[in-house]
Amino acid sequence: MLARGWCTVRKAPSLLARALTSMTNGFQSPPDMSEVRSRLRAIVGASTNWSDHVQAMHERKDLHILLAKQQEDLPPRKMNDSYIEVILPLGSQPELREKYLNVHNSVRFGRILEDLDSLGVLICYTHTKHEASQRSPLSIVTALVDKIDLCKKVIYPDCDIKFTGNVSWVGKTSMEVKMHMFQVGLHDDTYSPVLDATFVMVARDPENKRPAFVNPLIPEGPEEEEIFRKGELNKIRRVDFSTASLLKMAPTAEERTTVHNIFLNTLDTRTVSFRSRVLPPNSVWMEDAKLKGLEICHPQARNIFNRIFGGFLMRKAFELGWAIACSYGGSRPYVVAVDDIMFQRPVEIGSLLLLSAQVCFTEKNYIQIRVHSEVYDSDTREHKTTNVFHFTFMSEGEVPQIVPKTYGESMLYLDGKRHFSAAMKETREVEKTTAAP
Ligand SMILES: CCCCCCCCCCCCCC(=O)SCCNC(=O)CCNC(=O)[C@H](O)C(C)(C)COP(=O)(O)OP(=O)(O)OC[C@H]1O[C@@H](n2cnc3c(N)ncnc32)[C@H](O)[C@@H]1OP(=O)(O)O
C-alpha cells in the first residue's frame, strides 16, 4: 500500500513573496477554479457563445503584431512571477461537491486532471504576461503531461483543496510547469500534500498555427537553479525515451528474453508446436483485457481556442482506464501515477473520438493501463491518433497476470513495463528521500 508523504518535499515561496505575487498576478486573494477559467477567457478573448467563435477567432488575428520576433526581445521572468495559488473550496462551498463526487465518497480524479490543465495554462499566461495588453497574442496548448505522482489514496469530497504552481523551465516556445495539490484534513486545518504534477505547455501564435516565443526564465538561487537544471534533464530524458520507443527500435536483449519466456510459458507442452498456446493459471490474455468508448465532441467541451479541452480528453481517458482496471482487478482501483500523456494533435469540435483502454502490464496488485485515442473522419474514413495516455493503478488485492499472445501485444507489454518501472522508480526515490530521519 502506498504510504503517505511520498510527494516531493519542497519549499514554498516566503509569505511576503506569495502575497506580492497574488496581488501582481491580479488576484487579491487566492482565486477559485471558476475564476481561473474566466481569467483564461478574458486573456484569450474567447467567445461565450459558440455562434460567435468564428468572429472571436478572427479578432485574435490582430494580436499577431504583439508577437516577439525573437526570444531575446521578451523580458526574462522569475519563477515567482508565475507562482499562483488556487482554492477548490469543496469544504466551504457544498454546492460544488456534486460535480467532484464519485460513488466511493471520494473526489473524481478526472475532474482534478481538468483543473490541473486549466491551472497549468493560466500559469503559463502569467509567465508570458504582456505588459502592454490585457489580451495575450499567444495560444498556449498542453503538449504533454509528463508526470503526476500521487501520495494519497483518497481525496476527501468535503475538504478544501489548494493548488499551487509555477513555470519551472522554459525552452524557446515551450514551458514546463510544476503544480502541487494539497488538502486540509478531516480533523485539522493544515494542508497536506496530495500530488505533484509536471506538464509541458507550448505557445503558438494567435491562430494556433505556428510556434511562438516565450519569455526566458532566470532561476534565482541554488534551489531554483536545481529545479531549472532538472527541467533541462527532463527534456533530454523525453527525447531519449522517445528515441528508444519500441515503435522505432527493437527491444533490448533483456526485454527480448522477457517476451520469449512469456511465450515459452504459454506453449502447450503436450504438442511440439509453436502454435498451440495455453493460458497459464491465474492469467488473462491481453486481447481479453480491453475496453472501448466513443465520445461525440460537443462544443460544451471546447477550450478557449475552440478545440476540445485537453482536460476533458484526460478525464474521459482516465475514466475508461479506471473502468477497465476496476473490472480487471475485481475491486476498487486507486490511481498511483499518470505519465507521458502526449497531445499529438488537436481534437476538433464535432469529432468522433474513439478511445481504447488496454491492460498492458501487471505486477502483484499493480495494473498498468494504456489508453489510445483517435479521431475518425467519416468523410475520408481516416483514423488519426490524437493522444496516448498511461495510468498506473493499484488494486486492493493481487491481480491476474496479463499475457500477450502476438508480437504487437508483446511490444505493448514491454512499453507498459517501461512506463510502470519509470513510475515506480520515481515513487521509490521519493520514498527514500522522505524516509530519511
Ligand atoms: C470558449 C469558452 C470555453 C472556456 C473553457 C475554459 C477552459 C480553459 C481551458 C484552457 C486549457 C487550454 C489547453 C488545452 O485544452 S490545449 C488542448 C489539448 N492540446 C492539444 O490539442 C495540443 C495538440 N498538439 C499539438 O497541437 C502539437 O502537437 C503541439 C503544438 C503540442 C506541438 O507541435 P509540434 O510538434 O509541431 O511542435 P514543434 O516541433 O513546432 O515544437 C514546438 C515546441 O514544442 C515542444 N514540444 C512539442 N511536442 C512536445 C512534447 N510532446 N513534449 C515536450 N515538448 C514538446 C518542442 O520541444 C518545442 O519546444 P521549444 O524547443 O521551442 O521550447
Image (cartoon, rainbow, N blue to C red):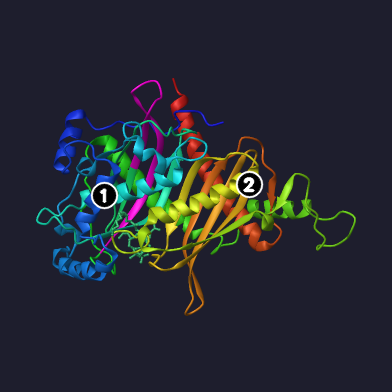
At which x and y percent is residue 413?
62, 54
Lower sequence index among marks 2 and 1: 1
Q: Given the image, on which type of amino acid does mark 2 rest?
A: Ser
Mark 1 Cβ inside 8 Å of ligand 1:
yes
Query: Which residue in the structure is indicated by mark 2?
Result: 327
Q: Position of residue 304 (x, y in %)?
A: 28, 59
Tell me: 431 left or right of 60. Answer: right
Which of the 4 image quarters holds residue 396?
top right
The reply to whether residue 76 is in sight is: yes
Give the structural element (helix, strand or loop) at label 1: helix
Residue in the picture at 57% in, 40% down:
333
The amino acid marked with disc number 1 is Leu
Residue stretch in magenta: 179-204
Q: Residue 391, position in %: x, y?
A: 52, 48
Q: Residue furthest left?
A: 132
Q: Residue at x 68, y 51 (%)?
A: 258
Magenta stretch holds residue 191: yes
Q: As rendered, which of 192 and 225 lies closer to the eye?
A: 192
Q: Nearer the viewer, residue 100 or 117?
A: 100
Q: Residues within 10 Å of mark 1 (few under 14, many from 20)?
A: many
Which SS type dominates the magenta stretch?
strand
Question: What residue is disc 1 on?
Answer: 122
